[in-house]
Image (tube, rainbow, N blue to C red):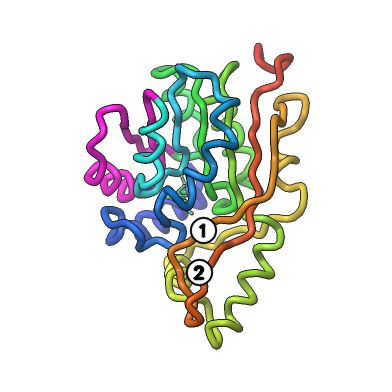
């Protein structure tokens, strides 16, 4: 395990430590009606029924709990043991379980796949939390979990998010709004996504793009103007390419 991987775990454990069992404290932790419920119609028809759904990078489990109302079995996974503890404390549904899993350690995805088989995946705003050189390893983990038959929905910040974040400083009178500033305080440094970055991670010889479109990431942060922070985003529905499935 590299120093960098430990840095992610330490940063996210410190971030989640005091807020993992409360709703709405994290910048992105809006009610599911404003996030996963808007996502659901974009991917549910593509996902083979009967496979477990993995909420990959589930944080405190807000969306895992919502997804469990729509899938037979949901597994929330996250690098942060603090997040997973909070998610367990606040979940009572019998069809939900949680595991600590590091996206950068494909062996952990192998172990989960060996236990539960092919999975559908829900991945909201996780990849951009990693530095670009680490993206291929996360994709490797996702590919292992998809197996031959799974389908993934990924939603990520759009390239225009960067300009949008800079504009927030003007609206707050300088500085980032408090819930976003809190993320940076723990040494979490999200990557900037450029046009085509995500699609480039899922090359056509291994993956098939089923659907894509524009959306927003609704947040829990209001500006002094009363305006809610809504970050420009994009989504992709992706499966394994048939020819790559035996690999
Ligand atoms: C921006 S939050 C999104 C949480 C959740 N998906 C949501 O939308 O509410 C990013 C999440 O990714 C997790 N994460 C960061 N690096 C990770 C890694 N290497 N492996 C697994 N999870 C990771 C963090 O702990 C955090 O919960």
In the image shown, does 224 or 25 lie closer to the viewer? Answer: 224
Total numbered labels placed on residues in the image: 2
Q: Secondary structure at mark 2?
A: strand
Q: Which residue is mark 2?
A: 228
Few, some or many residues within 10 Å of mark 1 (<14, 14–19, 20+): many
**Residue 204 counted in the magenta span:** no
Q: Is residue 242 above or below residue 137?
A: above
Location of residue 162 (image quadrant): bottom right
Q: Specify start and end residues of the magenta stretch as a single range.
A: 72-101
Quadrant that contains the C terminus: top right
Q: Work out whether mark 2 precedes mark 1 in sequence or the reverse, and give the earlier one.
A: 1
Please state if 218 lies on the left or on the right of 16 as rendered. right
* Residue position marked by numbered label 1 in the rendering: 218
Front in this rendered view, residue 92 or 138: 92
Q: Position of residue 216 (x, y in %)?
A: 59, 55
- In the figure, is residue 41 to the left or right of 69? right
Tell me if label 2 and label 1 are in contact, CB under 8 Å: yes
């Amino acid at each position: 395990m590299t120093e960098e991987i430990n840095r992610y775990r330490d940063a996210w454990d410190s971030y989640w430590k005091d807020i993992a069992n409360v709703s709405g404290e994290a910048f992105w932790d809006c009610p599911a009606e404003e996030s996963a419920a808007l996502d659901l119609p974009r991917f549910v028809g593509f996902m083979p029924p009967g496979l477990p759904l993995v909420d990959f990078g589930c944080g405190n489990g807000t969306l895992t709990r919502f997804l469990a109302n729509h899938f037979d079995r949901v597994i929330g996974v996250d690098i942060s043991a603090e997040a997973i503890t909070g998610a367990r404390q606040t979940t009572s549904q019998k069809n939900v379980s949680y595991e600590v899993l590091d996206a950068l350690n494909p062996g952990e995805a192998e172990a989960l796949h060996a236990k539960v088989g092919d999975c559908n995946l829900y991945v909201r705003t996780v990849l951009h939390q990693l530095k670009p050189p680490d993206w291929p390893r996360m994709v490797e983990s996702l590919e292992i979990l998809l197996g031959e038959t799974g389908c993934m929905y990924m939603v990520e910040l759009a390239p225009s998010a960067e300009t949008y974040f800079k504009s927030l400083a003007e609206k707050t009178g300088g500085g980032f709004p408090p819930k976003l500033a809190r993320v940076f305080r723990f040494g979490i440094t999200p990557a900037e996504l450029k046009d085509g970055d995500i699609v480039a991670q899922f090359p056509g010889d291994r993956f098939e793009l089923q659907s894509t479109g524009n959306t927003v990431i609704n947040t829990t942060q209001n500006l002094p103007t009363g305006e809610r922070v809504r970050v420009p985003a994009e989504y992709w529905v992706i499966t394994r390419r048939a020819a790559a499935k035996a690999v």
